[in-house]
Amino acid sequence: MKFFIDTADVAEIKDLAVTGLVDGVTTNPSLIAKSGRPILEVIKEICDVVDGPVSAEVTATDHETMMKEAALLLKLADNIAIKVPLTVDGLKTCKALSDDGIQVNVTLCFSAGQALLAAKAGAAFISPFVGRLDDIGISGMDLIADIADIYANFDFDTEILVASVRGPQHVIDAAKLGADVATLPPAVLRSLYNHPLTDKGLDAFLKDWAKTGQSIL
Ligand code: G3P
């Protein structure tokens, strides 16, 4: 399973990239706004830090302008994936870009039918938002399971990129379902390291080790 980081905070990305666990980055207009920085500058900087796909989202709502925005974003680096919303114009843009060999991440997916359309439009990634579905009392993980079944039935190459992840259990559940990618807020990736028994066990090992008076080096 690949881990992308869901942030436009370059300092956070640099901090996590050194773990060797970061396979890509996803951004969206809200995350760019939160960074307080110009989109082209911040996306370029992220692409210099991470080798894997960096999703940069178009903000136009019509196909022609989406294509113009995508062309500008694609000039920034070789590892840009263009993110488009799951709308008629978004999927037209997805088809046109995918036909040119460009990786497209289709975002704001909330149903299996939408995911089927995105795969048919050639999306490299489909981003179902599990947390936002859970927020309204609908199981986000049931959607991941449905999409996984449908994509397997037809051998679609589109990767399931689990988005709107709220905590470690989402990551575990998505991994059990065989999702290809999870995009994680930095705090969620950090939380995956943690277990109180790890801390307690390490503390006991170190105390016992100190009693031996030994040193490996
Ligand atoms: O990048 C899209 C997605 O991960 C947004 O998450 O927490 O705003 O629902 P959230």
Image (cartoon, rainbow, N blue to C red):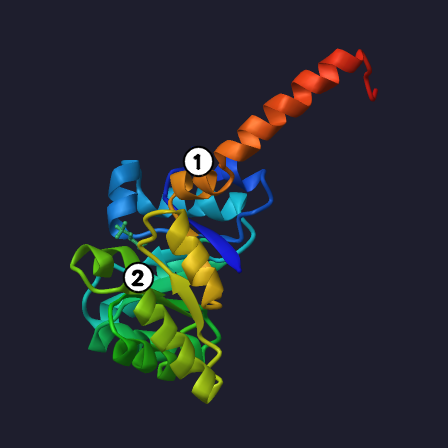
Q: Along the horizontal axis of the image, is 23 left or right of 140?
A: right
At label 2, the amino acid type is Glu
Instruction: Please report contact status of discs 2 and 1: CB closer than 8 Å, yes or no.
Output: no
Q: Give above or below for 157 relative to 23.
A: below
Answer whether residue 75 is visible to the viewer in this image.
Answer: no
Q: Please rate how many residues cluster around mark 1, counting C-alpha atoms within 10 Å: few if below 14, some from 14 to 19, many from 20.
A: some
**Labels in figure, total:** 2
Name which quarter of the figure residue 188 lies in: top left
In the rendered structure, the answer to whether residue 217 lies left or right of residue 187 reads right
Helix, strand or loop under label 2: helix
Residue bearing the label numbered 2:
69
Disc 2 to disc 1, C-alpha distance: 26 Å
From the image, state whether disc 2 or disc 1 is nearer to you.
1
Under circle 1, the secondary element is helix
Q: Position of residue 54 (x, y in %)?
A: 45, 54
Q: Residue at x 46, y 45 (%)?
A: 46
Quadrant containing the C terminus is top right
Indicate the quadrant where residue 75 lies. Answer: bottom left
Question: Residue 12 has which mark?
Answer: 1
